[in-house]
Image (tube, rainbow, N blue to C red):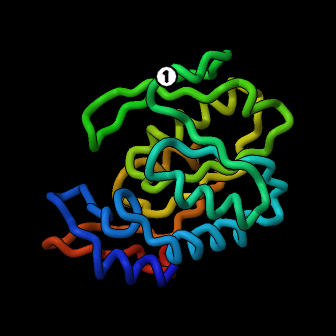
Amino acid sequence: MKELEDRILKDGVVLGGEVLKVDNFLNHQIDPKLMQSIGNEFADYFSDKGITRIVTIESSGIAPAVFAGLALGVPVVFARKQKSLTLTDELYSTEVYSFTKNATSTIVISKKFLDKTDRILLIDDFLANGQAAKGLIRLCKAANAQVIGVGIVIEKSFQIGRQLLEEENHDVYSLARIRAFEEGQVKFVEKEME
C-alpha cells in the first residue's frame, strides 16, 4: 500500500536493527485518514471471505481493526492484555511473548464475544515473530471459531512471523512489507518478490 509505505518513509524511525517506531501515525498518535485507507484496503482484500467478526489485540491493533470493521460492517473484539475488574464472565485466555517489550502477557477475550459460528479476520499493527497473531489464533481455536485471514499493517519480512502463520495455512495480507533496515533506512519487499 503506497500511501502507508510513503508515511513509513516520512515519519517512521528505525531504532537499532529490528525496531521501527511509528508513533506519529499508528501506535501513539493515530492518523484517522490513513487508518480509514488501511481499513478499506483490508476490507477490499477480505470482502468475499464471509467475515463475521474482527479480532485484534490491545492497543495498537484497535484503530486499523475498527476501520476495517466499519468497512466490512462487522463487530471488532480486542483481546485485553490483563484481566479487568469488568471482565467477570468466562474468558478465553492464553500467554503471548513480546520480543519488543521482552515480556510475557496474558491476553483474554470474553467467551460471549467469540463462538463456533464466527469467521474471524485477525488484524494487528505489526508482524515480526508472529507471537501476538499465534496467541489470537489460539483464542479463536478455543472458541471453535474459524480464522479466515490475518491482516497486518506493517510486516517485518526479515523475521519469522509470516513463515509461522503460513505453515499453519493462514492467509496473511500485509500492507507494508519491510525487507530490511539498512543504515537506518527502511527497505521494502519488492512487489515482484511477493
Up/down of 192 relative to 104, above or below? below
Q: How many marks?
A: 1
Q: Residue 144's spot in the image, x, y percent?
A: 77, 28
Up/down of 104 relative to 30, above or below? above
**Residue shown at 41% from the left, 78% from the top:** 5
Query: What residue did someone put label 1 on?
Result: 83
Q: Amino acid at mark 1?
A: Lys
Q: In this orientation, does residue 169 appear?
A: no
Q: Residue 29's spot in the image, x, y percent?
A: 36, 63
**Residue shown at 53% from the left, 37% from the top:** 134
Q: Nearer the viewer, residue 171 or 79?
A: 79
Question: Is 163 on the left-hand or right-hand side of 47?
Answer: left
Q: Nearer the viewer, residue 39 or 16?
A: 39
Up/down of 98 relative to 149, above or below? above
Question: Is 171 on the left-hand or right-hand side of 61?
Answer: right
- Callout 1 environment at 10 Å: few (<14), some (14 to 19), or many (20+)? some
Question: Is 17 on the left-hand or right-hand side of 162?
Answer: left
- Label 1: which secondary element: loop
**Residue shown at 53% from the left, 64% from the top:** 174
Q: Residue 56's spot in the image, x, y percent?
A: 57, 45
Image-quadrant location for residue 131 = top left
Image-quadrant location for residue 100 = top left
Image-quadrant location for residue 25 = bottom left
**Residue shown at 21% from the left, 65% from the top:** 14
Q: Nearer the viewer, residue 31 or 72?
A: 31
Q: In this orientation, does residue 86 appear?
A: yes
